[in-house]
Every structure is written in structure tokens, then in C-alpha cells.
Image: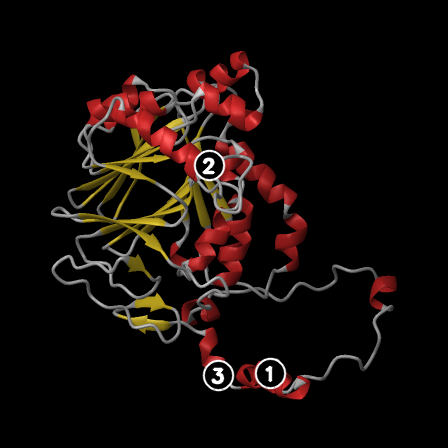
Amino acid sequence: MKSLLTFFLIVPCLMIPSVWAKPDKVDGENVPFGRLPQEIKNNRYPHTYFPGTEKLGGDEMRIVALGTGMPTQTPSNAAAAFLVELGNGDSFLFDLGTGSTERLSGLEADYSKLDKVFISHLHTDHLGDLAALWVSGWIGGRYKPLHVYGPSGRTKELGIANHVGHIRDAWVWDVSSRAGILPNAGGEIIAHEFDYSKTQVVYEKNGVEVISFPAIHIRDGSVSFRLNWNGLSFVFGGDSVPNKWFLKEAKNADVVVHECFFTPEQWMDIAGFPYKQAYWVTSMIHTPPQGFGKMMSMVKPRLAVAYHYWNHRDIEFEIFEGIRETYGGPLAMAADLTVINVKKDVIEVREVTVNHEAWAQGTSKEWDTAPRGEPATGLMSDWLNEGALEGMNPPPTQPLD
């Protein structure tokens, strides 16, 4: 019995063709090997979104909640992150909280397109996975720099440029050791810092406009964003209490994502905080359900999206009831891997089903041929090299030149 089981476990591995390591090209887009994305006709979306199976329409926006939770993320809630894909081929990440890159990998996405990240503020639950995307995306197919757009702070050391600079310094061992094996440009991470205190366009290219505007969250340096493209709009609020800038900039947008935190009483039950501290956290630096509802009643989006809470059912129902006290419009309670397709005539809310054994879709020919230097050598001391055992690893079977 044991030998038969071994046969079934091993033989499929021997049958895997090497071409699986490369994505397929479908209408100029990289998709996982063997996938053939289909056009959605007459807005007849399947109830479940399986990554790589649907063509994104030329006039369509797709939003995926990669993380909807807290600094202390749970198995069902990674920290805050949203992916926005557009019908023009562009992809944008809004925040990248701890654990969110695990959700991203489940989408088997084209990492070469995931080169733009917009950060709302410098809390770990909003950019804790930035270094992970920088390196894993480089290995997985990005052959251009990772661009990070984020706010300044009251002082220089509190801005995104300083933060990214320290990430670069902290991971110099990692990045320098990969030199030459991976494309040169993919190992770069570039910060684009803007003034957090102004409402301004911080990105404009290929018909896409991203606007930043101030948010109110603990200290100077938090912002929210609005993306406009092709008559469609997506608003992403990081963390903030309700404020006049959000009310103005989110007005009548198609999809508006805003935090919807716990009530003080819930936070006392969940975290054990005394009421004074629970109220400060939930209602003076965050937006609880009733506040979320009031904001959405004034903003009037085509779809309001609540996030930033643990989505345990006993808690989520209470949050939903709190929202409905003050807001009666279209509402989605976002969980990790909620997907929202947006067109001018329809908004479809579904869930993504991922293969938890999925691997990255593979590197492209463009990644293969991107400029490289020589592989890193001379990084180990002679005495360390001399400790290697000769003849243990098999010799190469193909030319190395």
C-alpha cells in the first residue's frame, strides 16, 4: 500500500512540463499557464470569481479586497489592502498591510503590473507587507522598479521617503545577494512623497488620475485617495474620523471604501480595553458604524464598502446594524477576497475563490531578457567558502554562458 501511495504522489510531479513556469499570453496579457479568460457578456457574472478566468472589459474596473482587518490580523483577515485593476491594463494597490501579499499571491497575478502602491499612512496594518511585495514581486516577474506613493509627515523622518529609504537599508543583505540573478531595475524601490496637507493630483498617466486629500488619524501625515478613470471612480479611505475633505472628494463616486471600526462596547469585549481607552480608539481616531453610515448618507456612492474590522459573524452583524441606523443605501461588508466589478451600468459584488496550493504565474520573456549584471560573487569570506563540501551537488547539464 505504501509503494502504491508513493507512486501516485510522485508520478504527477514527474509529468509536469517545464512550460508551466511561463505564463500564457491572451490578448497581450499574461495569464497563468493553461488559463483562457472568457469575456463576460450581458453582465452575466458567475457567482464566484476564479482568478484568471475572466477578461476585464475595456470600460470596466475590478476591485479586490486583499485585506480588510486589523494590526493583529487573523487567519480570515489580513490587514488593509485593495487591488484595483482597470480595463486599460493598469493595476494599482492601495495600502499593503501585513498579510495582504498572501492574498495577492492567491490571485496568481502578473507581478510585472504590480509596480504602483499608494500608501494612506505609515501604520503596519497599512504598509507592513511593502518589503514583501518589493522582493517577492521582483522574483515573481517584476522587471521594473516598485513605485511607492505616499504622504509626507510633519517632519522629514515621518514621511514615506524616509520610510522607504530605511526599508532599502534594512534589506540590503537580501537585495544585494540577488544581484545579477534577477533584473537590475526590479530591485529598485522608489518613493514618491507628496504633501499630506493638500488636495492634489499625485499620479496622472494613461488616462488615470489619482488624487490625495488629508485624513484625520492620530497625527499629521494620513491621507485618503480617489482614482478617476474612464468615467468611473474609486475612493479609498485609509484610517480617519469623518472629515470635510472626504465628504467633498468622495461625493457621488462609484465605489467608496471607508473604514468602519468597532463600537466602544465591542472593543471593550474584544480587546479588554477600559471604556475611556476604547472610546478614544474607536471614535476619536477611527470611524465607528454610525459615523460610517452618516458619511455615506452624505457622500451617496453607487456602492459603499465597509472594512477594517474582524469579520467574525457575531461582531459583523452588530456593525451592519449600526450602519443601517444611519445609512440605507447600497452597501458591501468587505471580507478578504471580496471582488467588485464596476461598469457604468452595473456593480457586481462577489467573492474570489483561490487555490490555496497556487504558485505564482511565472516570469515572462520580458523578465528573462531585462538587463542584469553579473551574479553576486565575493560576498563570502574565504574561510566560509572553504567549508563547502566538494562533489555533493550535481554538475550543470546545460551551458552556463
Residue 298 seen in the figure: yes
Circle 3 or circle 1, nearest the eye = 1
Residue 249 rendering spot, x and y as whole percentages: 24, 27
Relative depth, front residue between 204 and 105: 105
Tell me the crowding category of disc 2: few under 14, some 14 to 19, or many 20 or more residues within 10 angstroms, Cα based.
Answer: many
Q: Are marks 3 and 1 in contact (CB under 8 Å)?
A: no
Q: Earlier in the sequence, mark 1 or mark 2?
A: 1
Distance of mark 2 from mark 3, alpha carbons?
Answer: 42 Å
Instruction: Kindly identify which residue carries mark 3.
Output: 17
Q: Is residue 251 left or right of residue 20?
A: left
Circle 2 or circle 3, nearest the eye = 2
Circle 1 or circle 2, nearest the eye = 2
Tell me the crowding category of disc 1: few under 14, some 14 to 19, or many 20 or more residues within 10 angstroms, Cα based.
Answer: few
Q: The residue tagged with tag 3: helix, strand or loop?
A: loop
Give the numbered dot on residue 310. Answer: 2
Q: Are marks 1 and 2 in contact (CB under 8 Å)?
A: no
Q: The residue tagged with tag 2: helix, strand or loop?
A: loop
Relative depth, front residue between 228 and 8: 8
Location of the N terminus (image quadrant): bottom right
Location of the C terminus (image quadrant): bottom right
Residue at image position (40%, 20%) is 216
Residue at image position (47%, 20%) is 265
Instruction: Kindly identify which residue carries mark 1.
Output: 10
Q: Earlier in the sequence, mark 2 or mark 3?
A: 3
Q: Are marks 2 and 3 in contact (CB under 8 Å)?
A: no
Q: Is residue 200 left or right of residue 19?
A: left
